[in-house]
Image (spheres, rainbow, N blue to C red):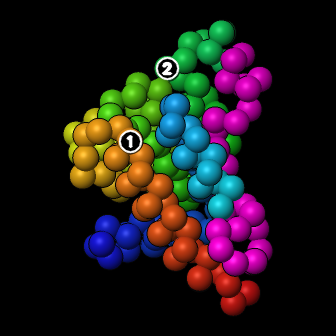
């Protein structure tokens, strides 16, 4: 498991130590996971420590609905990345199938902005994984199992980050 966690946690830690942020996005249950993991960074995972910059692009209904109405749903994350992401930020696109067009577009936009990109996908998530700097492919094809794996990996990453920042 450390071979999976180490490069992902290093990316998170490098960004956070460098004053950058972690940006999450996905659809449906993956949107909920994005919000959940962003909250773990901003509020806390298990212990009290300083707030860390985590953002979920799935929470602002005005942006989501205005963009989807005016431009379409496929670029709803890419547009937010364009507005909010800076070089060195870590951007995590979550797609159980690994083929969500708006997640792919968001990862492409993040790459163009100079971000470190991470894809969380299911075992067949080659499209999103190919767009990302790093990826975690859950060893499952059943959506519920993939989401459980994503949350487990997300919690492990939050734990590594929190332990690193606990002494401050």
Q: Is residue 25 above or below residue 61?
A: below
Residue 167: image location, x then y, percent: 69, 90
C-alpha gap between disc 2 and disc 1: 24 Å
- Specify whether 18 is left or right of 114: right
Q: How crowded is mark 1: few (under 14 residues within 10 Å), some or many (20 or more)?
A: few
Magenta range is: 41-66
Residue 106 appears anywhere in the view: no
Q: Which residue is drawn at 65% across and 9% down?
A: 69
- Specify whether 127 is left or right of 152: left
> Is 57 included in the stretch rendered in magenta?
yes
Residue 75 appears anywhere in the view: yes
Q: In which quarter of the image is residue 3?
A: bottom left
Residue 57: image location, x then y, percent: 64, 38
Q: Which mark lies nearer to you, 2 or 1?
A: 1
Q: Mark 1 points at which residue?
A: 144
Residue 149: image location, x then y, percent: 38, 54
Q: How crowded is mark 2: few (under 14 residues within 10 Å), some or many (20 or more)?
A: some
């Amino acid at each position: 498991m450390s071979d999976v966690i180490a490069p992902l946690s290093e990316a998170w830690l490098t960004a956070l130590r460098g004053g950058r942020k972690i940006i999450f996005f996905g659809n449906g249950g993956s949107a909920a996971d994005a919000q959940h993991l962003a909250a773990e960074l901003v509020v806390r995972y298990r212990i009290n420590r300083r707030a860390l910059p985590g953002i979920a692009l799935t929470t602002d209904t005005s942006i989501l609905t205005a963009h989807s109405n005016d431009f379409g749903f496929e670029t709803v994350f890419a547009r937010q990345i364009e507005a909010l992401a800076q070089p060195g930020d870590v951007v995590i696109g979550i797609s159980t199938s690994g083929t969500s067009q708006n997640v792919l577009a968001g990862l492409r936009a993040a790459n163009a902005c100079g971000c470190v990109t991470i894809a969380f996908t299911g075992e067949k998530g080659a499209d999103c994984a190919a767009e990302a700097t790093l990826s975690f492919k859950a060893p499952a094809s059943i959506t519920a199992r993939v989401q459980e794996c994503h949350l487990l990996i997300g919690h492990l990453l939050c734990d590594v980050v929190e332990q690193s920042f606990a002494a401050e």
